[in-house]
Amino acid sequence: MFSILVVTVFLASCLAMPIKDPYSYSSAVGQGGGTPFASYGEGRITAVRVWETNNNYYYYYYYYNSNAYISGFQLRYGSTWSPVFGSEGGLKQEIELFNDEAIVEVSGKYNPADYICYLVLTTNMGRTLSAGLPNQVSFNFYPVNVGNELRLLSGRFNGAGITSIGAHWGLVYMEGAGNSTQETALETVTPVF
């Protein structure tokens, strides 16, 4: 009889264990000067725009400088575009995601003295958007939990470009009115695989 009680208590305690936090954060990299930002919107990220500034110059046919950096970006949540973070200067790169496609990795390179130099967004379908020039210090962001996807980007920017960037990962609740990245991070969500 005592063993039945012990087994019952053990099983009940297993059921009462806390659920692992479905959200994770990849700490920001970069110099970090300027105005703070955090993207926001309802639902899943469905498209991304990234602007890159390329300050290459030549002197009598000799290549002298390769100072490319990310000047700004914009995320689309559902059908609504977020504000542009940074500036719209330079060359624009854009990717529109397919249904059930999500960003599962953010990587690139940054110059510790000034800007994010290179940004690569990779989806669960293997597609990528890359902008900038791959030089300086590498970074690689990905979610801690299986099934999570990029929910928002945060960091800092100044008048010329993005000076730091971090990634926030989570599950997307697709039923009802959608999931707002402005709401609490502790709401109950349904995994999307």
Image: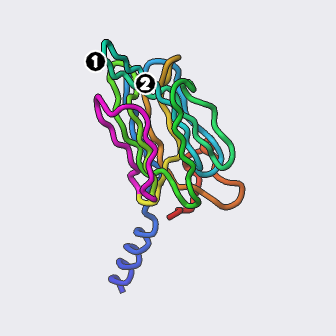
Which residue position is annotated with label 1? 62
**Element marked by disc 1:** strand
Specify few, some or many for label 2: CA neighbours under 10 Å numbering under 14, 14-19, or 20 or more.
Answer: some
* Residue 185, image x, y percentages: 55, 46
- Cβ atoms at labels 1 and 2 below 8 Å apart: no
> What amino acid is found at the position of numbered circle 2 in the picture?
Asn
Picture coordinates of residue 165 (x, y %)? 44, 32
Q: Residue furthest bottom?
A: 1
At x 45%, y 69%, the residue is 15
Q: Left or right: 38 with respect to 54? A: right
On the image, the x and y values in percent for residue 104 come to: 44, 52
Mark nearer the N terminus (1 vs 2): 2
Indicate whether 11 appears above or below 178. below
Side of 88 relative to 7 (left or right): right
Mark sitting on residue 38:
none
Can see residue 53?
yes
Answer left or right for 119 relative to 170.
Answer: left
Q: Nearer the viewer, mark 1 or mark 2?
A: 1
87 vs 183, nearest the viewer: 87
> Which quadrant holds residue 94?
top right
Q: Based on the displayed image, in which of its 4 quarters is residue 75 positioned?
A: top right
Which residue is disc 2 drawn over? 54
- Crowd band around label 1 with a 10 angstrom C-alpha radius: few (<14), some (14–19), many (20+): few
Q: Is residue 130 magenta?
A: yes
Q: Position of residue 51 (x, y in %)?
A: 51, 31
- Residue interval drawn in magenta: 125-145
**Compared with residue 180, is residue 158 higher up or lower down, i.e. above or below?**
above
- Residue furthest to the right in view is 177
The residue most toward the front is 60
Identified by mark 1, the residue type is: Tyr
| Residue depicted at x 58% and y 46% | 47
